[in-house]
Image (cartoon, rainbow, N blue to C red):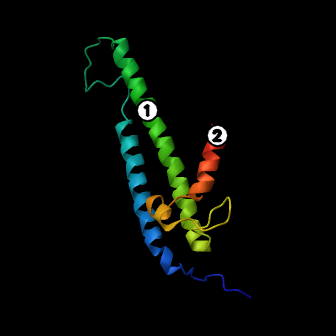
């Protein structure tokens, strides 16, 4: 019967990628935190101006654009965070560095540039050409 508290042994050749993924994850979490802090104010908050003057439509539009832009960045960050978490799980289960499409090894240079990648360059190009 297998032990339940078995410690996962990570392949030493993937340790560098695990460190890159941890660093990337920390950066993403920091970015998300900063975005949420930047957008925590109300669009009607103008640095304490309580003069009763209505905001100009252009100011309101700019505020709305800024918020929508920040929300888009946060959505991209959340998607990247999910990819990082999946890559870390693949390191733990021993499938990291294998293309999810063709099942061939992903080039080390690609993994260093994009440690969260799931596909080799050839398969990624195929996926992107299908999207067009």
Residue 59's tag is none
- For label 2, the crowd category at 10 Å Cα-Cα, with few meaning under 14, some 14 to 19 and many 20 or more, is few
Q: Is residue 43 above or below residue 24?
A: above
Quadrant showing the N terminus: bottom right
Identify the residue shown where x is 57% and y is 82%: 7
Which residue is denoted by mark 1 in the rendering? Answer: 69
Circles 1, 2 touching at the beta carbon (< 8 Å) = no
The residue sitting at the bottom extreme is 1
Residue 131's tag is 2
Identify the residue shown where x is 49% and y is 61%: 110
Rendered location of residue 25, percent (x, y):
44, 58
Rendered location of residue 80, percent (x, y):
51, 51
Q: State left or right for residue 3 relative to residue 75.
A: right
53 or 30: which is nearer to us?
30
N-terminal of the pair, mark 1 or mark 2, is 1
Q: Is residue 78 above or below residue 99?
A: above
Residue 35: image quadrant is top left
Q: Secondary structure at mark 2?
A: helix
Q: Secondary structure at mark 1?
A: helix
Q: State left or right for residue 94 relative to residue 115.
A: right
106 or 9: which is nearer to us?
106
Identify the residue shown where x is 49% and y is 67%: 108
The residue sitting at the right extreme is 1
Identify the residue shown where x is 25% and y is 25%: 48
Rendered location of residue 53, percent (x, y):
29, 11
Residue 43: image quadrant is top left
Marks 1 and 2 sit apart, C-alpha to C-alpha, by 23 Å
Q: Is residue 103 above or below residue 73?
A: below
Quadrant showing the C terminus: top right
């Amino acid at each position: 019967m297998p032990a339940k508290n078995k410690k996962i042994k990570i392949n030493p050749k993937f340790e560098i990628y695990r460190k890159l993924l941890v660093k990337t994850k920390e950066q993403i979490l920091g970015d998300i935190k900063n975005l949420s802090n930047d957008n925590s104010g109300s669009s009607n908050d103008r640095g304490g101006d309580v003069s009763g003057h209505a905001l100009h439509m252009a100011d309101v539009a700019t505020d709305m654009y800024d918020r929508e832009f920040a929300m888009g960045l946060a959505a991209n960050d959340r998607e990247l965070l999910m990819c990082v978490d999946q890559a870390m799980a693949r390191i733990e289960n021993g499938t990291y560095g294998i293309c999810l499409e063709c099942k061939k090894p992903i080039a080390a240079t690609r993994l260093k540039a994009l440690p969260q990648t799931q596909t080799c360059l050839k398969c990624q190009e195929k996926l992107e050409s299908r999207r067009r």
